[in-house]
Image (cartoon, grey):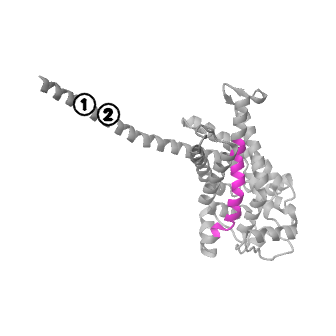
Amino acid sequence: MASEDVVSERSESAVSTIVNLAEEASEGVKAPSHALLSICKSLVAGGVAGGVSRTAVAPLERLKILLQVQNPHSIRYSGTMQGLKYIWRTEGFRGLFKGNGTNCARIVPNSAVKFFSYEQASHGILWLYRQQPGKEDAQLTPLLRLGAGACAGIIAMSATYPMDMVRGRLTVQTEKSPRQYRGIFHALSTVFKEEGPRALYRGWLPSVIGVVPYVGLNFAVYESLKDWLLRTNAFGLVENNELSVTTRLACGAAAGTVGQTVAYPLDVIRRRMQMVGWKNASSVVIGEGRSKVPLEYTGMVDAFRKTVRHEGFGALYKGLVPNSVKVVPSIAIAFVSYEVVKDILGVEMRISD
């Protein structure tokens, strides 16, 4: 009888072990699947946020680029309203959205990668921060959020830069331009063949330098403002431990204002460097101006020096007004759209968590 009890106990133990292993294996299979689904949903949410926010302000985006690259001797666009009216009169309604297809083709993956990278970078940075003695229960600080945002911006910009480069050229060409790029892929292949693969990354350095404060400050200001409002309930804006869509839009607007003002000169230099090497750039940029000198910059510092010397320091802020009118609602819409879409898709982890 004793031997039978031992055998029975061993059998029950073996069965229990097998069941436990099966459950662990089942959990191990489900976890990656669930994580992959969550990643896909986060990427979709980021892509939708980017597409919606950029399309909403596409006319202002085109006008900003035209103001950035136009020659001071041939002023076609002298202000926001005048510029929009001029585009409408000369190119019609479609002219207001020229380059938006390319912009969305670039911004959708860019936004998806940026938001996802920010979430991953913030978790990684916080984990490293908590490894320090006495920091085991630390939370994300504005400085840590700035670092995570900078990492996200660099990754997203580098991954989609060739699209941004050809988007700039598609945006500035008009119906009278000698060179007509027919679309995204035609522009990419033409630049690649005529100017070489390095041309697709022309202006990358000022872009990366600019994206560090721009994206970093966007995330840091947005998240820190939200965190402060939730903790202090300032102005009585918190309802059921949540901020309203309007309040979140205001936080995004503040973030966009700070980020774009700091990084704007680098954006101007980036656009000008992207025109270098384009044989017909002088015709597109200068139009009917007196000077037909080819656009030549040997690098980022040279572009800064020549721009300031020939056009003054104010040239580094050409197009700032339409860009401000564009960026403030664009950043606000992007942040709120991202969080709303994630809620709709049922993603548990939100950007602030």
Query: Is residue 174 shown to the viewer in this render?
Result: no
Which span of residues is magenta-colored?
199-222
Q: Position of residue 350 (x, y in %)?
A: 59, 38
Determine if the magenta segment contains residue 106: no
Mark 1: amino acid: Ser
Query: Is residue 181 shown to the viewer in this render?
Result: yes
Vertical comparison of 133 with 85: above or below: above
The residue at the point 58 percent across, 35 percent down is 343
Farthest residue in the bottom direction? 293
Considering depth in this image, is 46 or 100 the residue closer to the camera?
Answer: 46
Checking the image for residue 13, the label placed there is: 1
Q: Is residue 176 left or right of residue 124?
A: right
Quick one: SS at disc 1?
helix
Q: Is residue 51 left or right of residue 281?
A: left
The residue at the point 71 percent across, 42 percent down is 222
Considering the whole magenta stretch, tell me its main secondary structure.
helix
The span from disc 1 to disc 2 (Cα, nearest Å) is 10 Å
Task: Please give the residue where the numbered disc 2 appears in the rendered image.
Answer: 20
Q: Position of residue 319 (x, y in %)?
A: 81, 57
Dividing the picture into quadrants, the one containing residue 228 is: top right
Q: Position of residue 297 (x, y in %)?
A: 75, 73
Dividing the picture into quadrants, the one containing residue 282 is: bottom right
Quadrant occupied by the C terminus: top right
Checking the image for residue 99, the label placed there is: none
The residue at the point 28 percent across, 34 percent down is 17
